[in-house]
Image (cartoon, grey):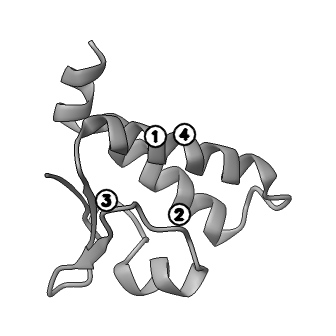
Amino acid sequence: MLNITLATKDTDLTFAAFKQYGLPAPVSGVDAEINDNLILKFEDEEAAIIYANQLQTLAGELHDKSSPEYKAISDIIMAIRNDEFVQSYTQ
């Protein structure tokens, strides 16, 4: 199991905002920390990469690249790509 946390100190995206925007969740789900940080859950690194690619496609379909949804998607993709376990997996 791989958990990637998007901390509110690094992004405006919270668990509540993730739900509000109606973004698709990873297959293994999402959770919230007590401070509303968003936790993305994945079976493994490959599942995280697949999810990031799916979000990249979704971002490409959004017409307003300045929307909060687009920023949220970008933050998730960056968090996944910057995760040390995902980076080790891709090398």
- Cα separation, mark 3 vs mark 4, equals 21 Å
Residue that carries the numbered disc 1 in the rendered image: 50
Tag 2 and tag 3, C-beta contact below 8 Å: no
Q: Secondary structure at mark 1?
A: helix
Decide which of tag 1 and tag 2 comes sooner along the chain: 1
Residue 14 x, y percent position in the rendering: 37, 77
Residue under the point 42% across and 43% down: 78
Q: Amino acid at mark 4?
A: Asn
Indicate which label's residue lies in the foreground, 2 or 4.
Answer: 4
Q: Which mark is residue 10?
A: 3
Residue under the point 33% across and 35% down: 46
Decide which of tag 2 and tag 3 comes sooner along the chain: 3
Count residues near mark 1 (Cα–Cα under 10 Å), then give few for <14, some for 14-19, many for 20+: few
Q: Secondary structure at mark 4?
A: helix
Tag 4 and tag 1, C-beta contact below 8 Å: yes
- Cα separation, mark 2 vs mark 3, equals 12 Å
Count residues near mark 2 (Cα–Cα under 10 Å), then give few for <14, some for 14-19, many for 20+: many
